[in-house]
Amino acid sequence: MTIPSFVVGIAGGTGAGKTTVARLITENVGESVTRIPIDNYYEDLSHLDLSEREAVNYDHPSAFEWELLREQLSTLLEGRPIEMPVYDFEIHNRKNEPTTVEPTDVIIVEGILALYDEKVNEMLDLRLYVETDADVRILRRIQRDVIDRGRDLEGVIDQYLSTVKPMHDQFIEPTKKHADLIIPEGANSVAVNLLEEKVMAEVHGDAVRDWERPSPETRRDRR
Ligand SMILES: Nc1ncnc2c1ncn2[C@@H]1O[C@H](COP(=O)(O)OP(=O)(O)O)[C@@H](O)[C@H]1O
Ligand SMILES: O=c1ccn([C@@H]2O[C@H](COP(=O)(O)O)[C@@H](O)[C@H]2O)c(=O)[nH]1
């Protein structure tokens, strides 16, 4: 049984480079890492038809099943496997079959609101916020949504202006204050190399952890 020793949260706006950072900092640790995309914890919307699901605001915190994420994360931290839901962006819903996820040394929790929930934040050893300019992010998103997620240009622009951008400003960007580190320009190589070394040290058991997370009060006092 593996009890995870290092849980990293990676938040940031759509297209900021969260998935890329997660991939790059863990690519040399083989099977010792588990990625938990919080997209998998979008509420089950099977009771809605496709056109109703298309109209949902997927950037609001209420779109996520936080209780399930908290529960499954703490199960992994106790060294037990979970049945993680799997999300399908093309149909805006979960797939029928969940996937079994075993606990590993390192766990990466990644998504636009990965630093939003207080209880999830308490389970994170390191909180990262990936920050990339909005113009770069929307260009990346257009490319990805049209090519990989089966959307048309007009729909991507409408969604961006009606929900993605306002929710980013209201809910996602403010979670930056919970971050231990802010990574500018997404996958910048200096940050990636430093974090990769840290992840490898955790996996090989020679990591030195001499920090203690400051309480919210101490953080405020430091400002
Ligand atoms: N530093 C970077 N330079 C260039 N392209 C990048 C960089 N980081 C990410 N990308 C590209 O931008 C797109 C979105 O990145 P991704 O990591 O999926 O973002 P997120 O997970 O935050 O939505 C991908 O096509 C990815 O290859
Ligand atoms: O059914 C859905 C679910 C989510 N989205 C959008 O996805 C992004 C989050 O993914 P990133 O990889 O971080 O970009 C979020 O902004 C939602 O708007 C969707 O379009 N449809």
Image (cartoon, grey):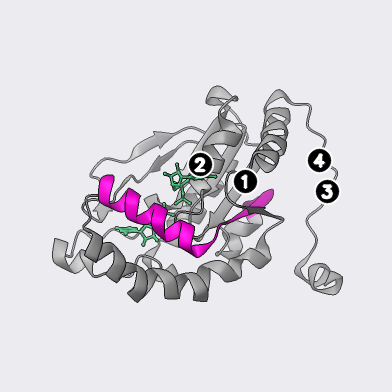
Q: Is residue 223 left or right of residue 1?
A: right
**Label 2 lies in ligand 1 vicinity (Cβ under 8 Å):** yes
| Residue drawn at (56%, 35%) of the image | 24
Residue 210 x, y percent position in the rendering? 85, 43
| Residue drawn at (23%, 65%) of the image | 154
- Three-letter residue code for mark 4: Arg
Q: Which residue is mark 1?
A: 8
CA gap between label 3 and label 2 equals: 26 Å
In the foreground, 112 or 151: 151
**On the rendered image, what quadrant is the C terminus found in?**
bottom right
**On the rendered image, what quadrant is the N terminus found in?**
top right
Secondary structure category for the residue under label 1 = strand
CA gap between label 2 and label 1 equals: 14 Å
CA gap between label 3 and label 1 equals: 14 Å
- Three-letter residue code for mark 3: Trp
- Let me know if residue 213 is in the magenta part: no
Q: Quadrant of ligand 2?
A: bottom left
Q: Earlier in the sequence, mark 3 or mark 1?
A: 1
Is disc 1 in contact with disc 4, using a CB cutoff of under 8 Å? no
- Three-letter residue code for mark 1: Val
Is disc 4 in contact with disc 3, using a CB cutoff of under 8 Å? yes
Q: Earlier in the sequence, mark 1 or mark 4?
A: 1
